[in-house]
Structure formats: structure tokens, C-alpha cells
Amino acid sequence: MTGVNITAWILGLGLGLMTLLFIFRIILTWYPQLDLNRFPLNLVAWPTEPFLVPMRKLVPPLGGVDITPIIWVGIFSFLREILLGQQGLLTIMSRVN
């Protein structure tokens, strides 16, 4: 494996994991009575909250619904496609080497 392949693998794993955590976070917003500071919900809340706090300052809730996790799913999916998709930057770089 080359350095580009290792980087692409780690980046793909990280972006995929964050996308999955934000999808779980979207599901958790359906249940506002749940305590996100208790195990195992804190495994979803703690890694996602640093991304959500600044985004909530930019995008207020629409009709009382927090859409910031949806925005982050879109951002991470977009980054994964741009970097690792079929025509992604790292994919093309790994083919050149």
C-alpha cells in the first residue's frame, strides 16, 4: 500500500464513521427526552457536538427542528465523494502512482 492508499483508507473510514454518527444523531433528535450524557448515547453525542455547536449559531432551527445534523451528513458525504469517490482526488492520485 502506498501513502495515498493508506491516507484514503483512513480518511474513508473517518468520514464514513462521522456520517454514521450524524445519522444516529438525526434519529436521536426524534427522542428529545433521552439524556445524551448517558452511556451509550454519549458515544454518539460527544464526537458530533463540536461540529453541531458552531453550525447551530449559523443555522437556527427551522420550525423548531434542528437541521444541523442533516447539514453535516451532507458535508461529510460531499467530502467523501470529492476525495474518495470514483472520480475523487485521492482515487485519481492512487491510480497515477
Image: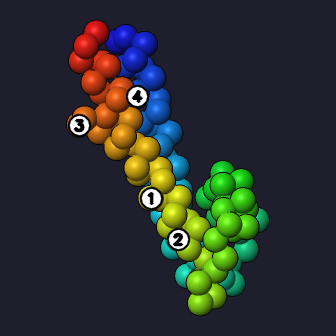
Marks 3/2 in contact by CB < 8 Å: the verdict is no
For residue 86, the mark is: 3
Q: How far apart are marks 4 and 1 (CA)?
A: 20 Å
Q: Quadrant of the N terminus?
A: top left
- Between the residue at mark 1 and the residue at mark 2, the CA separation in whole angstroms equals 12 Å
Image location of residue 48, percent across then percent down? 64, 56
Disc 4 residue type? Answer: Trp
Instruction: Name the residue tied to disc 1.
Output: 74
Q: Earlier in the sequence, mark 1 or mark 2?
A: 2
- Residue named by callout 2: 26
Q: Residues within 10 Å of mark 3 (few under 14, many from 20)?
A: few
Q: Which amino acid does label 2 sit on?
A: Ile
Check disc 1 and report its element: helix, strand or loop. helix
Q: Where is residue 49 in the image (x, y as percent from the top left)?
A: 69, 58
Confirm or deny contact between disc 4 and disc 2 (CB under 8 A).
no
- Looking at the rendered structure, the number of numbered marks drawn on it comes to 4
Q: In which quarter of the image is the C terminus?
A: top left
x 68%, y 66%: residue? 58
Q: Mark 4, residues whose alpha carbon is within 10 Å: few (<14), some, or many (≥20)? A: some
User: Residue 60 has which mark?
Assistant: none
User: Is label 4 in a helix, a strand or a loop?
Assistant: helix
Residue under label 4:
9
Please tell me whether residue 92 is drawn above or below residue 2 in the rendered image. below
